[in-house]
Amino acid sequence: VILDIFAEDDKGRVFDVEMQVKNNPGFWKRAWYYLGQIAGADLQKGKPYDDKKESFLVFIMAYDERGNGKFRYECDFLCDRETVETGSSITLLNAQGKTGKVTPELRDVFHLMNDQLSEVRTPFGKQLIKDISRAKLDLAKEREFMDWATKLRWAKEDAAYETSTKMQWLLPNNCAN
């Protein structure tokens, strides 16, 4: 597993933040595998499972995996249609979303992902624009940025095609919202 960003906060909770620019087959299997890896990483043999740290997997998506137009999808574990507390979850942050609430900073990230620089409003978003501009001055970083931008453009084209053909994906019941 290659983690895009792995962090632990001052409460001991662990986070894996992944950028998902293309709708690849097996996404949900990979997502649950990643969550299992980070959730089980701190378990020690013979220690109680209650000692497991809370773990969160977050995907920042260039496309709407669920197709419901929400900015944010929360995926928890269900048993008989009721949430079971495991201390782990998956969150999808959808740059193509139209409904729901997100912070102004996250909305600016979505604006940047959608090439809407003129819509960026927060100091955080404006700093991201400066950082991207600075990275473009370094030829090696410029190449990395161009690779990322091309992949993002391809993902948008793929997402538009999938939306226009109204393809349905078989997804776990516990992520139906």
Image (tube, grey):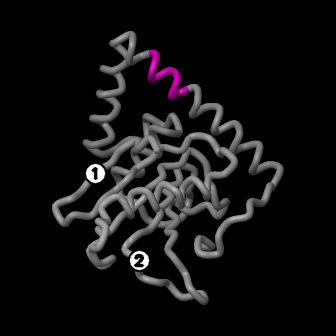
Looking at the image, which residue is at 37% across and 74% down?
87
Q: Residue at x 57, y 50 (%)?
A: 96
Front residue of this view, candidates 169 and 107: 169
* Quarter of the rendering occupied by the C terminus: bottom right
Residue density around tag 2, few if under 14, some if 14–19, many if 20 or more, within 10 Å:
some
Q: Position of residue 93 (x, y in %)?
A: 48, 56
Q: Nearer the viewer, residue 21 or 127?
A: 21
Question: Which is more N-terminal, label 2 or label 1?
Answer: 1
Relative vertical location of residue 80 with respect to residue 137 in this rendering, above or below: below
Image coordinates for residue 124, horizontal then vertical, percent: 27, 43
Q: Residue at x 45, y 47 (%)?
A: 18
State the image coordinates of residue 22 (x, y, percent, origin top left): 62, 41
Q: Residue at the far left: name it.
A: 10
Mark 1 surroundings within 10 Å by alpha-carbon count, few (fewer than 14), some (14 through 19), many (20 or more): few
- Residue at image position (49%, 68%) is 74
- Secondary structure under tag 1 reads strand
In the image, is 164 to the left or to the right of 110? right
Kind of residue sitting beneath label 2: Thr
Q: Residue furthest top?
A: 139
Label disc, if present, on residue 86 of the rendered structure? 2
Kindly give the residue lying farthest to the right in the view shown: 165
Question: What stretch of residues is rendered in magenta?
Answer: 143-149
Q: Label 1 vs label 2: CA separation?
A: 19 Å
Disc assigned to residue 7: 1
Asked if residue 106 is positioned above or below residue 168 in the image, the reply reads above
SS majority, magenta: helix
